[in-house]
Amino acid sequence: MSFWSLELPPEAGARAVAALAVTGLVWAVLAAWHAPVALAALVACAVVLELFAGDILRAGGRVISPSLTIVVAAFALYGTPAAVLVGFARGGARLLSSRALSSADGAFILAGSVFGPMLGGVVATLASAFGVATPLAAAFYAVTAFGAEVLAPAACMRSIGPPSLALAGDGIAGWALAAFGALTALGYLLARDITVGDWRALGYFVVPLIVVRISYSALRARSERYLTALERENVDFFDKIGKLDRINGDLIEALAFAVDYRDGIDSGRSRRTAQVATSMGQTLGYASTELETLRRGALLHDVGMLAMPGQRTPRHVEVGTRLVARWRDYAQVAEIVEQHCELLDGSGYPHGLRADAIGMPARIVGLATKYVDLTTPRPLGAGMSHDEALDEIRTMTPDKYDPMVVQALEAVSTPASADVLPLIRREKRAR
């Protein structure tokens, strides 16, 4: 690790490892001169497995795949150089089937596919030379090749660059080593069958995996089509929900207009109250969904007037609350309608609630209603000016109105704001 402690760019380390891998590959080509036809068959088999069955059995970075069995079989049949050649072909196929790999990732994957069988083969060969039994030699091969092909590239990438390969081994090292060992044992068994001339074993090994891969691909394609259709249905469903919500909003606007029209004043009183209340909510930091609830509660705060002609009384609040409560999921709006006439000292109506018993949205709408009432022209005279209305409200704070809500009103209600300017009275038509 002292080499990696030198402050070298990731490209330099990747190039050095790639150069060493090329050197090992040249050695393998020069040494593996015998049995070219058999080696070609094993190379082709490893490439086919890596391309078509590589992502069935894998653990991080597609290092452990069924093609590893062919590499081990090549070693058992023709020695380490043959295993290196097959391993290099396997690594090249892995690069072709992978997407969006950096040059550093590609270099380490290819180097691992060369160094794994090279070091594993050297260790297993030395073990056999000292009289170690074949199963134990195979275990030495698996452990050594696993370290060179899986652990070493992961450690190097963790040291010199983004942990693209390093993360592949986190939490799976034990399982990965077991899988590596099992595929190594299978490679020795495959080599034993080929040694006695039974090349059919290679077909028995390759064909089922390819069939599984094709079946898996078909199943995945059907799953993707199903998920796509499901997503499309979800989009349509939410679009319909949006349309229903817009219809609800239009209905609320219409009801607010009807309430204002009964007053004989074309001032848009309810809409104006909603504008002031929403601006106050923004000042107080309300989220978008909370602001929409506040706006709808302000629009509907006097909806009970449609059923109760005459002056505003506790009865019209109760009727309005019962009407809005019939809307599903409008409990918060109904609470605003029910509490907007309540005052902090308990002198409001219809229940005489005090202080914390009154919800903050209802306090906002109640103060916005008071401000609009004070500044709206009446048939018998003009309404108060902006400053006069604020002075009137301050005399009732904090007894009747929340000081924080009053401060929000002061912040948004300025004479330059179109939302709160006194509006022009519409003359009543002659009957």
Image (cartoon, grey):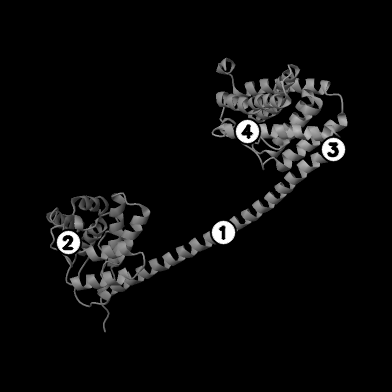
Query: Local crowd at mark 2 within 10 Å, few (<14), some, or many (≥20)?
Result: some
Q: Nearer the viewer, mark 1 or mark 3?
A: 3
Residue where numbered disc 2 is placed: 353
Kindly identify which residue carries mark 3.
198
Q: Nearer the viewer, residue 255 or 390?
A: 255
**Tag nearer the camera, 2 or 1:** 1
Question: Label 3 vs label 2: CA separation?
Answer: 92 Å
Among numbered discs 1 and 3, the one appearing first in the sequence = 3
Residue sitting at x 63%, y 35%: 61
Q: Nearer the viewer, mark 2 or mark 4?
A: 4
**Label 2, label 4: how far apart the Cα atoms are:** 71 Å
Q: CA distance from mark 4 to mark 1?
A: 39 Å
Q: Which mark is residue 178?
A: 4
Which of the 4 image quadrants contains residue 21? top right
- Label ID, residue 267: none
Q: CA distance from mark 1 to mark 3?
A: 50 Å
Image quadrant assignment for residue 60: top right
